[in-house]
Amino acid sequence: MAPPILMLRDIHLTFGGTPLLEGAELSVSQGERLCVVGRNGSGKSTLLKIAAGLIEADAGERFVQPGATVRYLAQEPDLSEFATTLAYVEAGLAPGDDPYRAQYLLTQLGLTGAEETARLSGGEARRAALARVLAPAPDILLLDEPTNHLDLPAIEWLEAELKGTRSALVLISHDRRFLERLSQAAIWLDRGVARRLDAGFAQFESWRDDILGREELDRHKLDRKLAMEADWLRYGVTARRKRNMGRLRALESLRKQRREQRRATGAVKLAAAEGEVSGKLVVEAKAVSKGYGDTVVVRDFSCRIQRGDRVGIVGPNGAGKTTLLNLLTGELAPDSGVVRLGANLQWVALDQKRESLDPTWTLTEALTGGRGDTVIVDGKSKHVVSYMKDFLFTPIQARSPVGALSGGERGRLMLARALARPSNLLVLDEPTNDLDLETLDLLQEMLADYSGTVLLVSHDRDFLDRVVTSVIVSEGDGRWTEYAGGYSDMVIQRGRGVEAKEVAMPAARPIRAKAEGEAEGEAVPAPKPRAKRKLSFKEKHALQTLPAKMEGLRAEMAGLQAKLADADLYRRDPAAFEEAVKALDGAGAALAQAEDEWLTLELLREELEDG
């Protein structure tokens, strides 16, 4: 195995109370791809900050190979010192780095470079921060939730970009498919200890469950031994007391061992309080349109949603997913067309920005509405502390302000508020934001058992595949189409995934911010012209070979489609049918990636030739 270029050894850290890290270790070799997984609050982000040199551990050793470059992506990047996104990204380049790459990455991530950093949304700031850490092509990339606030096109582009990088990767993410496609090893951070699995995330959950199962068995054996020793202590012969002091000491040691064991954090208990049964028809939209000014967000859209349907809504940021959701629930009136809601609807909504949470509330007030200490769940009264425990909040947090909660804790609080109310229609706008993998599993199971109807906006492809029965996707220009099945089924039927919205590039590079001490009205010197860039050998080779590769993929897809056209294939050989579907999905994704790469290079070639 290659020697590590970054190593953390025997890391200990305590912020007060229970230790956060107890002997945690991390080793990263050249080109290695690791994912760090664990419950919210287990210390994943802290471990990454220690690896980046931003936090000093109480004890332990950090080693970085001399000359190795490390770039760290924070969950909440700070761009306040820079006037524009391009200035922010260029400031991360080292001497000798390709200056064109800053603008190229911003464009690929849907930014122009002219955006003022003071006016950026959370998603735009995340895209600029990604461009900044990717631009220098460092030896090690430490990425904390890189897919947060990104839409599907940006997530899929980032996947392709990271697959092609030579940098070693350490990833924290709650996006299963993202981790499955990128990771080669997993670090499980649990109760302060880091365990390593030398296999990708696809193998992680079964490995973790085996470990927890063995721990539970060991704990059961320890409990039985304690019971036997305690029985001996109560009923043993007193004459033997003197020569059995060693056995007494062993019993005390066992009791101490049992007290000091840190058990795995309990699971969130998710159950929706279901209301009365709704009518068979839930929502019917006929030729619905909605626009703002000259922009048409929804154009001539029709659909019919019935009781029990689980409908996903997907599209790039800015396509109008939330607008469509509000039209379908009657919260927003259409400019033309008709939306008819079914009878006896009781619906509960979860908004993606958590705007309904007042940061000055305590957790008790947020769950009870400020009325007493009980919550009505499914028609029954329950003490608020007991209900909080179902969502992994501790009793001491009952009087804590909402503003002090982490993103994951706010997500769980929103779920707790929403699921306490009786409903037969759940309207979920980005419910998976900031939730850990175990909570996502339980949310998925709850939705599978829910007898009502679900409208879901999400960028999580795996979650969509596990939950929805149909997908409404943005086709651009305000047009939306419904496809049967999950996200992967939609990609197969449509022949492509969700495309990014086109970005209007600025006519000229923005004027730089005035330097400190520069006189008012003083002329700003023009930037020195850069040497004319040429296509690299790798780019020229890709331009020459990609057309043949794309033709090969199209031929492969045509053969697979012909195979799937056989109506008896599934009945004859279900395994062959599933294998063909997966192969078609993979070939379609590879073709889309190759087409994007070829188009990017062709545009670059034309730009350089014209220049």
Image (tube, rainbow, N blue to C red):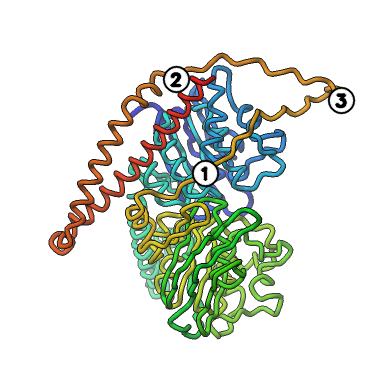
Residue 494 drawn above or below residue 424: above
Looking at the rendered structure, the kind of residue marked 2 is: Leu
Give the spatial CA distance, label 1 vs label 2.
Answer: 29 Å
Q: Is residue 504 left or right of residue 66?
A: right
- Other residues around mark 3 within 10 Å, as few (<14) / some (14–19) / many (≥20): few
Residue marked by disc 2? 535
Identified at 63% across, 34% down, the residue is 506
| Quarter that holds the N terminus | top left
- Other residues around mark 2 within 10 Å, as few (<14) / some (14–19) / many (≥20): few
- Other residues around mark 1 within 10 Å, as few (<14) / some (14–19) / many (≥20): many
Looking at the rendered structure, the kind of residue marked 3 is: Glu
Give the spatial CA distance, label 3 vs label 1.
Answer: 40 Å
Give the mark nearest the N terminus, 3 or 1: 1
Residue marked by disc 3? 520
Identified at 53% across, 48% down, the residue is 150
Identified at 84% across, 23% down, the residue is 517
Please tell me which residue lies in front, 372 or 501.
501
The reply to whether residue 248 is visible in this rendering is no
The reply to whether residue 226 is visible in this rendering is yes
Q: Position of residue 116 (x, y in %)?
A: 70, 38
Q: Secondary structure at mark 3?
A: loop
Q: Position of residue 132 (x, y in %)?
A: 57, 33
Residue marked by disc 1? 146
| Quarter that holds the C terminus | top right
Give the mark nearest the N terminus, 1 or 2: 1
Give the mark nearest the N terminus, 2 or 3: 3
